[in-house]
Image: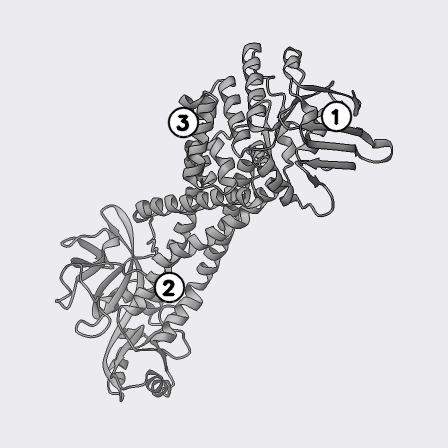
Amino acid sequence: MTDASSRQPLIEIAGVSKHYGEGETRVDALRDVNLTMHRGEVVALLGPSGSGKTTLLNIIGCIIDPTEGRVTLDGERVYDDRWLRRDLRKLRLDKIGFIFQFHNLLPFLNATDNVALVLRLAGRTAAEAQARAVELLDYLEIGHRKDAMPALLSGGEAQRVAIARALANSPRIILADEPTAALDSKRAGIVMDLMRKLAAEQDACIVAVTHDEKIYDRFDQLFHLRDGVLDH
Amino acid sequence: MNLAYRDVRHNLFRFVLTCLGLSLLMAVVLAMIGIYNGLVADALNIVKAPQADLWVVEADTQGPFAEASKIPGGTRDAVIRLHGVSEAGSITYQTVEADHAGETLRLYVIGFEPGRPGGPQTIAEGRGITQTHFELVADRETGLVVGDRIRLGRNSFAVVGLVEDTMNSGGDPAAFVTLSDAQTLQSQLAPPAQRVQVARGAGLLESADTVAAVIARLEPTADPEDVARTVRQWKHLGALTQAEQEAILLGSVVDRAKRQIGLFLAILLTVSAVVIALIIYTMTMEKLKQIATLKLIGAPDRTIVALIVQQSVALGMVGWSFGLILILLVKDAFPRRVVLEPVNAAALAGIILVVCIAASGLGVRAALKVDPATAIGG
C-alpha cells in the first residue's frame, strides 16, 4: 500500500451534501461527506445501489455541483461562484481522466484516434497527439490494435484503449466507474494492476466505484457509502 | 480531427442511403424549378422568335398571346409606311389538332409571310419554306421528321424543315406555314355554327384576309413608344412594344402557373426542411451517449455543435448534388421542357444550406441539453 500520509492531498471533500428535489420529494444523495485522497493512491468507493457512490464520483468529476460543502481538486477550490460550466469542462480536460464501465469509446474513431482526440481537444497538434496516443497504446500493450475500430476490440482491449484515453492528457485524477465490471477476473486483475502502476508512475489519484469484491485488495483505501453517508 | 467526417465515414452506407432519399426530394424541387423555367422560356421564345420591336394588334386587346386579336391583312402595308419602321410582317397563331402516325398531334400553327419578320429564325434540320403553299417547318418536339406529310384541315403539308425549342406557353410545339395557308386553315377550322350561318347567308361574310398581328422591326434610331403612339391613333388598332408584350405574357398567361409552382416549391422546401430536421434530430438522439462522453472528456460545445451542423450541411449538399445529377439525367424524359440554369441550382444550394443549418437547430438543442453524467450512467 502507498504511504498516503506522506503525500500531499489531491482531492479534498469537506462537508459535502447533495440533495435532489424539495419537501416530500427531497432525496438526500449525500450527507456531510468528508474525505481526502492523495497523489499515487488508488481508492475505491463502495456501497449498495443508491448509496451515493456515483453522485460522489460526479461531484469529484465536476459534472454535478454539491448542494453544500467544499471540493478542492489539486489545490484548486471548485464549485464556488466564479466557476462557469465551460471552466469545469476545461478543468475536466486538464486534470481529470474518466474510465467507464463499458469503455464508451467513440465508435467512429479507431483506437489511436479515440486517445488522440483528448489531446487534440487540449490543443496539441495532430502529429503530437498521434505520437502520444501510439506511445500510450504501446505502453498498455495494445499497440498492435491501434488501427482497430472499437467494435472490433475485445472487452479487455477496449478497456485498455479507454484507460489510454483517460491517461492521454496526463491527468492528476482518474475516475473509474466499475472499470472491471465487464471483464473476467483475470482481466480485471490485469486492469487493476495496470491502474496501480499508473497511479504510482504518474503521481495521480485513481478513484474507482466498484462492486467487484475480487479486486478490493488492490486498493489503498476503501470508502463505504450507505444512504449517502460515509462509513469509515 | 473532423468528427462529423469520421462519423459519416463510419456510417457511410446509411448516410448515402439517407442522402439518396433526400436527393429525390431535391430532384423534385429542381424539376419544379426547371418546369417553371421551361414554361417561361417556351412562352418567351414564341414572343422573342420574330425579333420584333413592335406588335400591332386589334384595339383594346392584349395581343395574340393573351387574347384573340384579329386585324385586316392589309394593316401590314400601312404599318410599314410609318416613320421609323424598317420591316413588317403579318402573322397568325392558332392551335390545331392533327392526326399523324395514328396519334393526335397538337400543333401551334404560326402563319407568316416568307421573307418578312415572323418566320423561324434558325432551321435545325432541312430548309425553310420556299413554296407558297403546303410546306411546313415544325418543331422537333412534334416528332415529325423532314419528308413527313401531315394533313391540316383539308390540305396535306410536307415537312421541309425542323426547328428547336419553339413552343407556346401551353407546351404545344410550333409548326410554321405560309400566311395564306394559315388563313385558309383558319377558315376551314372555323366553328361549325359559324359555317352554318355563312352557308345560310345570314350575317356578313367575314373577310378571310385577317391576321392576328403585324410585327414590325424599327430603325435603330426609332423610339418604339413613339411609333406605338402613332399606331394607336388608328382607332381599330393597338400597339405593344416588345417589352410590353413579354410583360403581358408573363403577367397574365404565365403568372398563375408561376404562383402555382412557386407555392408547390415552398411546400417542397418546407417538407425538405422538416425531413432534414427529423433526420438530424434522429442522428443526434442516436449519439447522445457519445455526445455525453465528449462533454465528459472536456469537448467544448463548439465541437459538438460542429459535429451536428457539419453533418446536416453535408447531408443537404450531398442530397442536393445527387438530386441535381438525377434531374440532369432524366430532364429530357419530361413531356414539358425542363430548363435548369446554373443560377437556379446555386440558389437552391444556398436555400438548402440555410435550411440545413436551421434544421440542425433541433439536434443541437438536444445535444447541448445532454448531461455529461449520462456517460457514466449517472
Q: Residue at x 22, y 47 (%)?
A: B101
Question: What residue is pinned by disc 2?
Answer: B193
- Quadrant in which the C terminus of chain B is drawn: top right
| Residue at the far right in the pictured view | A23
Q: Position of residue B154 (x, y in %)?
A: 22, 59
Label whose residue precedes the other's in the sequence (3 or 1)? 1
Secondary structure at numbered mark 2: helix
Give the camera-side residue of B165 and B295.
B295
Q: Chain of mark 2?
A: B
Label 1 chain ID: A
Circle 1 sits on which residue?
A52
Q: Is residue A17 visible?
A: no
The residue located at (67%, 19%) in the rendering is: A220
Quarter occupied by residue B146: bottom left
Instruction: Report the Cα–Cα distance between label 2 and label 3.
Output: 87 Å
Amino acid type shown at disc 2: Ala
The one of B14 and A173 positioned closer to us in this rendering: A173
Q: CA distance from mark 2 to mark 1?
A: 97 Å
Q: Callout 1 environment at 10 Å: few (<14), some (14 to 19), or many (20+)? A: many
* Residue A21 drawn at (x, y percent): 80, 35
Q: Is residue B94 visible?
A: yes
Residue that carries the numbered disc 3 in the rendered image: A147
Three-letter residue code for mark 1: Gly
Amino acid found under the numbered disc labelled 3 = Asp
